[in-house]
Amino acid sequence: MFSCILFDLDGTISDPKQGICGCVQYALRSFGIEEPELDRLEPFIGPPLAESFMKYYNFTAEQAQEAVEKYRERFSVTGKYENVLYPGMGALLHDLKASGATLAIASSKPTVYVEDILVHFGIREYFDIVVGSELDGRRVHKEEVVAEVLSQLAARGESDPDKMVMIGDRSFDVEGAKAIGAHCIAVSYGYAQPGELENAGAEIIVRDVEGLRSVLLGGTQAGNSAQAGSGTQAGSSAQAGNSTATGSNTLSERYRGSAAKTKTKSGQFWSAVGTSALAMFAYYVISLLISSAILTAISVVYAIGLQELEGSSYNFWLNVASALSTFGAFIICYGIWHKKIRFHSTKEIDKLSIVPMVILAAAIAIGMNGVLTLTELYRFSPTFQRVSEMQFDTPVWLGIISYGILAPLGEEIVFRGVVYGQLRKVLKVPYAVVLSGLAFGLFHGNLVQAVYATVIGCLLALVYEWYGTIAAPMLFHSVANLFVYVMLELLPFGGVFLSVPSCVLFLVLSAGSLFLLWMLQGKAALRQKG
């Protein structure tokens, strides 16, 4: 595992063809040159723009600079957003950052544009260092950019080139890595010409983002095959460039799937389980400590035992303590594990799908409450009866804040952000969904809430998976809690929702909403891939 990973931007992290080539068309048009075929302008992706205008259109240095200015006229407003992340790249960056690696951008594009693009895609938070060229013409060559990244890494005490790797799609990226003595992984899904990466001496060439993930996080099966590993080319002189000449320190040697250098699947699984258990334990203990401290303080103020207060006052202070402890646990757990959680989605979201998601949250909450009430499961759980009495014997404003806002924030950070996120790395989606749902159910500590929370937890995990952002299950959880609180406790006719016909209606509505949500987000995912 490399401690420092340098990424090129265009053709490596994102596909900028529409934006770059469209802006080159715009610049050429100002010189009376019409170039209707975007494909013919692909060589402009990667190298310094001025050099490309001189090379491909025989511009003088002055003309090339004028063309660059015209290019930026459109690019600064429109072109920089005519861009798309390569499938799986957002998740890879998230996982690399979560693994503890230092990530940097080394791009020939002006830094100001690089920053805007990273923010636009919601991936800026993953990069510790962002270096590009300057608008005044300084630092346009990749060797200069990479040298500046190395300088900034050295200031952080991370200047060992053998622990660094440059990832890019052009020969310039390979040469930039060599200039500082770093390793280089080339990606063939970008805009390199046939044979360009091999001739430049790339140590390993990967065909897709999954191949890149395999090399950086999971190891690669490198041998004498020209297509070794998952989406990876390595090991033969025709594909590995200098990798066959530098001995045991080459990438091909380093990533041959050695058990000594990579965790086994079993080890990865138990590591994920351990992190999940730690997060749940921390959330519980922190909540308990804060709640106990608050209740102790209240007892001191009243100068009597808290149990001696009247029923409503007692429940009120319990709810206050619960709300504050939930908030405190949320803040602390967020501070510890926020780097492991997906806040900015890399998935295309169909805004219309939010409607069935909200309907599903409300319907399943009422439907499940109806099932649990009609089966009288509460009779077997005295603990649930005490908890329920305490939760609903509180002012409306406190109930909304505590159960409609704070509880969803804290529980989603832990159970979807950490628990499901960790399990998802080592298990297929169905297994990760079910296990995280069971963990959520068992955490509640009584039979009734365990059944309810397991079902809701599975749906929350699916919502997190489909939307790719923790904000989605937070919204779902909040709607479910508030709907139950308002419909069953605050409305005088709330009991009608617990009848058999009502229960069946809400469960059918839940199934229909779930299907519609799956369809809408499924189509959005297909659009993104296409």
Image (tube, grey):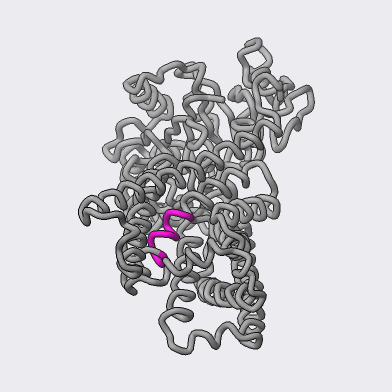
Query: Per the image, is 410 magenta?
Result: yes
Instruction: Tell which residue pokes out farthest to the right in this image.
Output: 225
Relative to 54, residue 172 above or below: above
Instruction: Locate the C terminus and report the quarter of the image it occupies.
Output: bottom right
Q: Identify which residue is drawn at 47% across, 76% down.
A: 483
Residue 508: image x %, image y %? 66, 80
Residue 167: image x %, image y %? 53, 32
Residue 465 appears in the picture as rendered: no
Relative to 423, residue 352 above or below: below
Residue 246: image x %, image y %? 63, 11
Q: Identify which residue is drawn at 53% across, 51% down.
A: 415
136 vs 393, nearest the viewer: 393
Residue 405: image x %, image y %? 39, 64
66 vs 353, nearest the viewer: 353
Question: How many numbered discs?
Answer: 0
Residue 370 appears left or right of 389? right
Relative to 200, residue 57 above or below: below
Residue 4 appears in the picture as rendered: yes
Instruction: Locate the N terminus and report the quarter of the image it occupies.
Output: top right
161 vs 394, nearest the viewer: 394
Residue 149 appears left or right of 193? left
Q: Quadrant of residue 425?
A: top right
What secondary structure predominates along the stretch shown in magenta?
helix
Relative to 195, residue 161 above or below: above
390 vs 152, nearest the viewer: 390
Q: Quadrant of residue 396?
A: bottom left
Query: Per the image, is 448 magenta?
Result: no
Q: Identify which residue is drawn at 39% across, 22% down.
A: 150
Q: Which residues are magenta?
A: 403-411
